Image: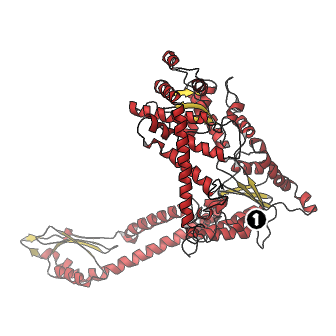
């Protein structure tokens, strides 16, 4: 806060303090003058010479006295000190000549003091100071740490000491960087585009899952352009006070225009850019008012040249259509999951300051981390570095990488947990069912580890690793996926003569896959290539009440029947598959009960018959290494 603003705040505080003091002083005087009956009673004691001693404060009018034969002390606030002194003159003059109960009362019992008016105002001053302190701290804390006078100011953070990012810090997003290079070139050489009549997009919307590097890309654009960067979160606009959000939007764009060319970055714009009219009630929505102001600032009557708005969100489906039209967010850049080449580049960026052992191959790690985002890969290397430091190693080794991968996916191993022999056996056959089903299904990923050691919420895991980054999933892949998911439940039915609750998540996922096959992908021959229920995937409760589903009750029954038919067919196929491999099931379960985990190469040997039960008796426990994966099964 500037000195001028400080003076204004303290002026207001002083006025408030004086007002409180005056009100307190006047009310106290009125209270003293309000009790006439008690004054008459007090004067009767003086007129009858019943007062043995008293003390009067001329400043405050406070009277303290005792009665003859009574040690109790009485207090009274005299309304008018001068009148009281005049009316008790006779009492004071005759005080020495009066006797009560045989006791001579001396003049020294009469005390008249004057503590002055300033002394009497001490309680008032303390009360006022306390009130001012409370008011000051309330004003200081209001508005998320801002001042009372800055509610309508945008909550911008100082970027002077922030680390500058460039496109070299962004890996695995070559096409995205190419799209943003035009923005950088325009900010550096605006006349080149103006001379040819080209208009650079006013807004760039970065779309994609969390952790894919949207915020990093925005920071890299600002670092490359070398222009002022105004970052703010969508939630910073919304306040408890009506109109504050719109005021902050105006202030944000005003500051950017003063420093043009400049970049405004709004992170998580879905906090203020949600679809309007989505509430249950018809009342005013502060979020909508903020959005309206944002729409006007981006493309309204006022010019907004040389100020580019970059926003990031992972929920494009809930943004208002007016925000997405050309003239506002002209360019929408999808920042998706990196491919194998992109993952390798990201790993190299995050491994720059980390010593890697000779057995660490970033290319292999990139191949085994399909579906990982940039944030996941950064976390993976950080966890591996922590494991290496914990074991007093000077470099990160391959086992550190492998363990960190599973730790990121499913959490750390819980080896200290006491598990009954029955639970271990159920888990062993459950995970064996998943693994053997995956091995015998041609479209499923390779098994790289099976373990019955608990991780996170899973009692055991079947870890698989994809060989490619395929984007399309066929009907046969989804059908065999359901068979593999049901492998754990079917194994319990066949080999444990009972079933457990451990397959609940598997059944839920299998049902979801089957329902999507019927309602979204048109994989049902009975219901045809029709999408059912798209309107019901509504994220707004208010809009959900405004429409009904787009199919009849009869079709709903057919959908349920078709889903159940797919699940039942997959279940019967899984029963047939596991019965045909019952000897492998028992052998794998025994291996897991003895060693608790098996890696990919040993699993392949077991399935090819190169590892028999006789070999198992002579086999020592394998090294505690964990292979990488992208998928876990409970």
Where disc 1 sits, the SS reads loop
Extreme residue in the right direction: 195
Q: Horizontal placement of 428 versus 95: left or right?
A: right
Name the quadrant containing residue 440: top right
Q: How crowded is mark 1: few (under 14 residues within 10 Å), some or many (20 or more)?
A: many
Of 39 and 209, which appears nearest the observer? Answer: 209
Q: Nearer the viewer, residue 328 or 343?
A: 343
Q: Label 1, on which residue? A: 328
The answer to whether residue 1 is seen in the rendering is: no
Compared with 575, 143 (above or below) is: below
Q: Report the number of discs.
A: 1
Q: Residue at x 48, y 43 (%)?
A: 503
The residue depicted at 43 percent of the width and 43 percent of the height is: 501
Residue at (44%, 64%) from the top-left corner?
A: 130
142 in relation to 446, above or below: below
Q: Looking at the picture, does residue 124 appear above or below residue 579?
A: below
Instruction: Tell me residue 104's x, y (percent).
Output: 11, 70
Q: Quadrant of residue 324?
A: bottom right
* Res. 164 visible in picture: yes
Is residue 41 toward the left or the right of residue 610 in the image?
left
x and y percentages locating residue 233 in the rendered image: 64, 57
Horizontal and vertical percent for residue 332?
75, 57
In the drawing, does residue 254 fall left or right of residue 18?
right
Q: Quadrant of the N terminus?
A: bottom right
**Image location (x, y in percent) of residue 229:** 74, 54
Image vertical order of residue 240 relative to residue 370, above or below? below
């Amino acid at each position: 806060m500037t000195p001028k603003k400080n003076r204004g705040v303290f002026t207001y505080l002083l006025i408030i303090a004086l007002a409180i003091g005056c009100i307190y002083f006047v009310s106290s005087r009125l209270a003293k003058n309000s009790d006439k009956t008690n004054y008459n009673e007090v004067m009767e004691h003086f007129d009858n010479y019943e007062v043995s001693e008293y003390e009067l404060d001329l400043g405050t009018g406070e009277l303290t006295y005792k009665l003859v034969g009574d040690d109790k002390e009485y207090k009274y606030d005299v309304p008018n000190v001068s009148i009281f002194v005049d009316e008790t003159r006779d009492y004071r003059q005759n005080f020495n000549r009066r006797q009560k109960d045989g006791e001579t009362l001396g003049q020294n019992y009469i005390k008249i003091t004057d503590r002055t008016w300033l002394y009497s105002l001490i309680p008032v001053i303390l009360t006022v100071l306390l009130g001012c302190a409370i008011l000051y701290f309330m004003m200081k804390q209001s508005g998320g740490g801002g001042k009372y006078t800055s509610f309508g100011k945008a909550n911008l953070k100082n970027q002077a000491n922030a680390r500058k990012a460039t496109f070299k810090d962004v890996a695995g997003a070559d096409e995205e960087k190419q799209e943003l290079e035009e923005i950088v070139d325009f900010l550096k050489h605006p006349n080149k585009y103006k001379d040819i009549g080209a208009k650079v997009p006013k807004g760039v919307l970065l779309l994609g899952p969390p952790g894919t590097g949207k915020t990093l890309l925005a920071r890299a654009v600002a670092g490359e352009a070398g222009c002022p960067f105004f970052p703010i979160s969508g939630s910073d606009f919304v306040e408890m006070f009506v109109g504050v959000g719109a005021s902050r939007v105006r202030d944000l764009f005003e500051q950017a225009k003063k420093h043009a060319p400049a970049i405004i970055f709004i992170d998580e714009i879905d906090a203020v850019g949600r679809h309007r009219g989505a509430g249950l009630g018809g009342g005013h929505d502060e979020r909508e008012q903020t959005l309206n102001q944002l729409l006007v600032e981006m493309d309204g009557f006022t010019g907004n040249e040389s100020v580019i708005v970059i926003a990031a969100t992972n929920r494009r489906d809930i943004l208002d259509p007016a925000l997405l039209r050309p003239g506002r967010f002209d360019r929408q850049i999808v920042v998706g999951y990196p491919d194998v080449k992109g993952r390798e580049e990201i790993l190299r960026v995050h491994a720059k300051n980390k010593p890697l052992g000779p057995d660490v191959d970033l290319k292999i790690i990139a191949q085994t981390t399909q579906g990982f985002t940039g944030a996941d890969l950064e976390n993976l290397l950080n966890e591996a570095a922590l494991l290496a430091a914990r074991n007093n190693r000077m470099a990160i080794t391959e086992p550190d990488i492998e363990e960190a991968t599973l730790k990121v996916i499913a959490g750390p191993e819980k080896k200290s947990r006491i598990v009954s022999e029955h639970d271990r056996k159920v888990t062993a056959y459950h995970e064996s069912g998943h693994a053997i089903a995956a091995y015998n299904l041609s479209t499923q990923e390779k098994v790289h580890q099976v373990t019955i050691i608990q991780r996170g919420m899973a009692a055991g895991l079947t870890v698989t690793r994809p060989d490619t980054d395929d984007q399309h999933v066929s009907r046969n892949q989804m059908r065999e996926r359901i068979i593999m998911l049901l492998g754990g439940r079917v194994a319990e039915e066949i080999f444990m003569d009972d079933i457990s609750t451990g397959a609940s998540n598997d059944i839920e996922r299998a049902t979801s896959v089957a329902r999507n096959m019927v309602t979204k992908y048109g994989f049902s021959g009975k219901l045809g290539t029709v999408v059912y229920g798209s309107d019901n995937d509504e994220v707004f409760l208010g809009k959900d009440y405004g429409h009904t589903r787009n199919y009849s009750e009869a079709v709903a029954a057919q959908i349920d029947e078709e889903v159940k038919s797919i699940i039942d067919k997959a279940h019967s196929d899984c029963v047939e598959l596991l019965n045909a491999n019952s000897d492998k099931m028992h052998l794998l379960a025994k291996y897991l009960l003895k060693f608790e985990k098996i890696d990919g190469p040993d699993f392949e040997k077991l399935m090819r018959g190169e590892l028999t039960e006789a070999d198992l008796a002579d086999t020592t426990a394998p090294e505690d290494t964990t292979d990488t994966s992208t998928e876990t099964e409970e």
